[in-house]
Structure formats: structure tokens, C-alpha cells
Amino acid sequence: MARAARTKTPSVSDAKTSAASPSRPAKAGARRSGANAPDKAELLTYYRDMLLIRRFEERAGQLYGMGLIGGFCHLYIGQEAIAVGMESIKRKGDQIVTGYRDHGHMLAAGMDPKSVMAELTGRAAGAAHGKGGSMHMFDVQAGFYGGHGIVGAQVPIGAGLAFANWYRQNGGVSFTYFGDGAANQGQVYEAFNMAQLWKLPVVFVIENNQYAMGTSVERASAETHLSRRGASFDIPGEQVDGMDVMAVAEAGARAAEHARSGKGPFILEMKTYRYRGHSMSDPAKYRTREEVDQVRKTRDPIDHLREKMEALGYTDEAAMKALDTEVKKIVADAAEFARTAPEPDPSELYTDVYAEA
Amino acid sequence: MSIEVLMPALSPTMEEGTLSKWNVKVGDAVKSGDVIAEIETDKATMEVEAVDEGVIEALLVAAGTEGVKVNTAIAKLSGEGETSETNKGDTSGDKSETGDTKSAAQTPVAKSVIAQSSAGDPEKQPPETVKTISEGEGPAPVTPRQPLVDPELPEGTKLVKISVRDALRDAIAEEMRRDDKVFLMGEEVAQYQGAYKVSRELLQEFGERRVVDTPITEYGFAGLGVGAAFAGLKPIVEFMTFNFAMQAIDAIINSAAKQRYMSGGQIACSIVFRGPNGAAARVGAQHSQDYSAWYAAVPGLKVIAPYDAADAKGLLKAAIRDPNPVVFLENEMLYGHEFDVPDPSGPGGDDWVVPIGKAKVRREGRDVTITAHSRMVGFALEAAEKLAADGIEAEVIDLRTLRPLDHETIVASVKKTNRLVSVEEGWGAFGVGAEVCQRVVEHAFDYLDAPPTRVHGEDVPMPYAANLEALALPSVDKIVTAVKAVCYK
């Protein structure tokens, strides 16, 4: 059900399956050594998945503007390469947990765009039955553990998911995402310490989009190279071009292998950029329009991949157009569904507070 | 086919704004992400980005127009085969369908949703049911349908005297033997054998995998425990005292208590946070606080505060088995006290579990009801003996569980005695006693012969000096005085 949207283009969905299989890290390694050109189907999948997030978020922004989405809504536009690249190296049984800029991760994890959009509009058919909203969504089947609204709180939780993997010796890795703002939270370092002390299988992915709400990394952080933040705990770290989906996938594969093999946590600092404000209600006056435009023109993850594919001769006009149309339709259908689906029944007010003992 | 561009809301509270500037003119081609206009509100100036691709056909609102209502069409775009239904510009339709689920339910899409979702059909729900729920009192669904009773002990069950400390230890050990998912973590729980020796010898029996010494990082390890619980393990997180859990309260409330609800029932969080709570002796303000009322105020948590060893054991076992986050408040001063507990090696005692959510009448009496929990139960029982000498027969109710609160037992007692004194160690303001009194007023007002009253910790941080500390805490004498006052004696 959750992956139904993908199966509409069999070739793409097949590529996705193989990308998620255990053989994937070896492939990434081979590519790193330059032995093989990147696989066409794989690149198409990246492209499609990033495009889906971009179009979905644009539409979410629009629905917010129409008053159909309430509260806070943090868009992922600009950061798509991270969720998509990391998803490609994730294995079955691995977990993901992140903060409140979470829609992109949900879509990358394979959650149904309809259920995500319907959660944004607070409908019964939403991923959390309309009780969570933009910041609190979950899909255990997809290995997606949220969607957390308190800056940094997901980091010990991610270490706890890894603890459960270690406890069960099940080979799973927890991918724990947080931003440059959360990177200054004390609990992050408490989690780093325990993760390394107990060699927990966790990859800490710092999505450094340069601004913690309106405060730039330089204005908030004594050490701005966030990949070094594990140094006191002897946790290795690496800076990655988070606007390059292939670079993300390669670094992700190495980090996951490190964690999976019992060597403990690994930190990936993804250098990225968000095009929109911190949330929909942020006018983003702390940076210039030129700064944003510059990144869009020169580093956009989707354009960047498309250029690469064109150079490799992977972009046949008709197929790209079809893909574009398919993604637009998925998003339009999700928006229509989210707009018309019923709100939760009033009787749901008191359900799910407690589980029956 | 043209698409209407609507005046967007840029914040949760924005209703209208000024369209200060157009960045495009009729005939311009725009694509997703292009800034087409600037909007001003009283708080900020914002840029409006295009979502759809197309050519500007018309600008419907002139630059500089003030008070443009959200969702007003401000421009027309000629689409390029855009598939979106949301953009067709029927704004009035949008509004009514958002607000009214029934009209939305007329569409075929919405019908299929109802069929898929477990939420049920709003149209099939009798309105009275809804009304009852919205006006209901407290967490109704938690209150068990069947009346809870303590487990019956088989004839001839042997009782053994053990300390509260060992009862807690036995409860943890028995549950760890029973279920591999259960593990204990906290400061000094393993090699040191427990700061208060509650986890004595557990490391030897269960090993380092299941008895885990943590660094002194309450926020971190409480959050880590919550993550492990999300993944299906059943952590017992020990705080050396609940004073230190203040560092972790975000993990307990924001991450554990709310998880099930905000995930629409998808993610359970079966976890026990336990440790000593309240005042020990002469440890001063930062080590002597009673957090009963803090946690008992939070939906999603269960909160237990036992008095004797049998309850400590039976309720901790129930807490570990419970699929919800449980805050289990112990008392350091009671750890060494010995009480009768069913012999674990005999019938009735081999799996001694006490139901959560059931108060216990510790002493029957006709003249006044005294409610208390944790260490204060002992004070209340002592006060009752003194009062009996003066001819006042007090009924003493041990609350045992604070959330869900068993107000049926309290109310039934007050209907008999017509008087209430609640006792708690914590501060009175917004406290457990305040809640108990309110429930009695609500459910037994006509039975009361005197205003319900409270005995509680004084409204000051805990002082260090021995005499001041004694003055700050409830005492047997304070309870006796309060009871005599409500009995007009």
C-alpha cells in the first residue's frame, strides 16, 4: 500500500528494489573506484524521488497558503539529495528518525504521498490519523520513527533504536538525522557518548543547511565543522556534498558499513541548503535573495543530477517528460485526496492515549 | 485552462495582507519557484513563489492593495496541461469542504477513505456519543470497564516479611526472567549494585547486556530508553532520584507520553521510569522534591506511588508489563521498611501482580476519609490510631496509582464518612490533594458535612536545618489536627 505510487512505473520501481538490496553498498564502492559508469535506472530513481519531494513540498506550501495546512510546516526543498541518497543504501530493518523537517524523509522511505499530505491537512486518512500533523508522522513498516518536534530529542531516540538493534543483534542500523541547530543541543553529546561507548549501530546524519531558523552556523557554533563534533568521543566524521545525491549515497554506504560491522557510530555532515524559510511563516530576512538564487543556480541537487544524466546520455526526452507528468499527477492526486478526505471522527479525540493493558 | 493564484496565508494566524508588489506582468512565463509577488503583513514582508507553470493571463489585484483576504484570487495563469484539481480556484468550495467533513464525504474519494480507515464513519456516529465524550470527565477510556480488584490469595498462602527494596528487586528480577525484552538501565545499577541497592545481584544473574550502567546523563539515557521502547524493547530506566529526572522530563513527556497519541496509535512506548521521589532526610531543596502532581497531570503516562512492599512488588510487575509509559515513584525512606509479601515460592505469591488504577482501603472507619500515597500512607495510618483513641474512626485510602486515579473508591468512602482530608508530601498548590478534593466536590458534594481539606508540604523549597525541614513536611500531628477540624472537634 505504502509503495503503491511507485509501482506505476515498473522500471523505476524495480531499480528501487535493487537499490535497497544488500548488494548496493558494494556497487557504490565500485563506482567510487571509477570502475563502472553509474547505472541508468539507479540515476533515474534518484531523479524521480527527488522530483517527487520537490513537487510535493511546493504543493504543500501552496496548500498552506490556502489555509488547508495549519500550524508549522517546514519544507525540505533544496535538501532532497540527502533523504533520497541515504534511502538508497538503507536495508530492510534499518530505522530512520528525524526532526520536524520530515516530509522528504517520509516520501523517500516509501510512505504514500496521499497519507503524508492528508496528515498535513489533518485528515483521518493521514499517516497519524490526523493527530500528528507536519511535525509528527510515523510509519513503522517503512522503518520511519518520526517526525519529532523538539529540536535534538530525536538524537537519543535514534541511539535507542540502535541500542535495540544491538540488544537483538539483528544487523540493523539506525539513521538518525538532525540539523545544524540541533547539533548544539547537550543531549546530542550525551547520545554520542553512549553510542560510541557501547558501539551502537547508528549513523548520525547532520543536515547542515546553514541556518538554525534565522541564526547562521557561524553565529551559533564555536566549531562550524560539524563533522568534527564527534572528536571528543572518538567518533569518525566526514563532510559530504549534500547537494550531490551520488556523493550522499557513497558516503552513506561507507558510514552504514562502519556502523553495521560493529565499529560503532559514524557522523556524516551533509552540506546542504534550504531554499524556503525555516517554516512557512519565516520571511527569511537573515539572508539575501541573491544567496538563495546563487545556490539554486549552481548547486541544485535535481538540476545537478539532470546535467550529469544528460552528459551520460541517459535522458531521453519522452521518458523524462513522462516521469515529470507521473510525479505531477501523484502530487496532484495527493493534494486532492488531502483536501477532500474527511477529518477524524470526534470520537477519535480520546483514542490512542493509552494502549489496553 | 487557467489557474487562479490565491492570496496565501503565510502564518497560522494571518487573515489578510497587503499585496505590495508584483514581480511579474501579464504575458510573463513563470515556473515553480519564481517569485511572482511580495506581500506585507503587520509582522513581515514575504515573497510569493509560483507553484504552477504557465503564462500570466491577468493580475486581479493591483500592487499596493491593502487588506487582501487570504484565498482571494490575485492572478490568473494559463496552465500547461496542469493536472492539479486544487488550483481550479473554487475558493468558496475549498472553504466549506475543509470545515465540513460531511460534505466532503459525498465525494467518491472520501468514501473510499472511510472504507480504508479505522476511524469509522462520522455519519454513523450518533451525536449523543460525541457529546458524552467531549463533556466527559478525565481520561474515560483508561478507566477499566470491569471493577479492579486485588488478586485473591489462595487459602494458606504463606507471607514473608521483606523490605520494599527487596520487593522492588524481586519484581525486576522476576519480570526479566519472564521476558527477554525487559532490561534495566541507569546510573550505578550494575557494578555498584544500585545506588540504593535496589538492583543488587541483578548484574550477576542477567549480565551486562540487560543490566546497563549509564553515564550521568539523564536526558540522554532517558531518551535512549524511549528509542529502545519505540523499537519494541521494555526498558526500566532507573533515576538515582526523580530530582535528577528533571533533566530528562522532556524525554518522559514529549517523547514517551505523547508518542502513541501523535502517531495515531502506531508506536507504543512500553517503558518504566522509576526511582526514589520526594524528601529523604536533610538533603536540601534540590534533592527533596515530590513530583507526584507533575507527572500525574500528563495524559499518556500512568503514575504509581506505592507504600508497602507487596504493592511495590505487585505494581512494579504490572508497570513493566504495561504497554504504556509508567512513572513509578518510590520513596527512599521506605526502602528499608519490611512488610508482608506473598511468598514467591508458594501459591499466590509466585506471580504477584497488583492492578494499576485501583486504590486500597488500608483501614476502615466511619467518621472521616483520609487519602494518601507513598510514605504518607504510614503517617495517615498512625494518625488514625491516635484519632481512634479520641473516638474518631478514620478510613485510610492508599491511592497507590495517581493516574488513572481511582476516584470511585474515594467517592464511595466519602459518601459514607461525609468528610475528607487528603495528605501528600508535595506542595499543595495544583497538587494531588487539589485533584482529589475537586473530584469529591464534583461527585459527592451533597454528602459533604465539612469542606474537604488538605495536608501537604509547605509552600517553600525544602530547607536544610532539621527543625525547618520537619516544619516543611506533613506530620502525623498535622493530619490529626486537620481531621479534628473537619470533624469539628
Image (cartoon, coloured by chain):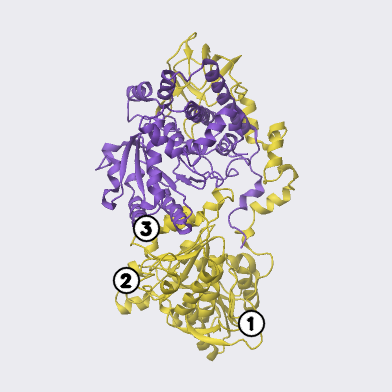
Quadrant containing the N terminus of chain A is: top right
Q: Please determine whether, in this image, residue B436 is positioned above or below residue A354.
A: below
Q: Which residue is mark 3?
A: A198
In the image, the chain rendered in yellow is B
Across and down, in percent, residue A352 comes to 60, 53
Q: Specify few, some or many for label 2: CA neighbours under 10 Å numbering under 14, 14-19, or 20 or more.
A: some
Nearer to us: label 3 or label 1? 3
Residue type for callout 3: Trp
Q: Which residue is mark 2?
A: B284
Q: Please determine whether, in this image, residue A24 is positioned above or below residue B326.
A: above
Please check whether the numbered discs 3 and 2 fall on a single chain: no
Quadrant containing the C terminus of chain A is: bottom right
Give the side of residue B282 with respect to residue A354, left or right: left
Q: Residue at x 59, y 51 (%)?
A: B265
In the image, the chain rendered in purple is A
Secondary structure under the numbered disc 1 in the rendered image: loop
Q: Which residue is mark 1?
A: B153
Secondary structure under the numbered disc 2 in the rendered image: loop
Query: Disc 3 vs disc 2: Cβ atoms closer than 8 Å?
Result: no
Across and down, in percent, residue B325 comes to 52, 60
Across and down, in percent, residue A294 comes to 34, 22
Q: Residue at x 47, y 77 (%)?
A: B376
Q: Specify few, some or many for label 3: CA neighbours under 10 Å numbering under 14, 14-19, or 20 or more.
A: some
Q: Which mark is residue B327?
A: none
Q: CA distance from mark 3 to mark 1?
A: 44 Å
Residue type for callout 2: Gly
Nearer to us: label 1 or label 2? 1
Q: CA distance from mark 3 to mark 2?
A: 35 Å
Please check whether the numbered discs 1 and 2 fall on a single chain: yes
Looking at the image, which is closer to me, A324 or A261? A261
- Give the quarter of the image for residue B197: bottom left
Looking at the image, which is closer to me, A312 or B241? A312
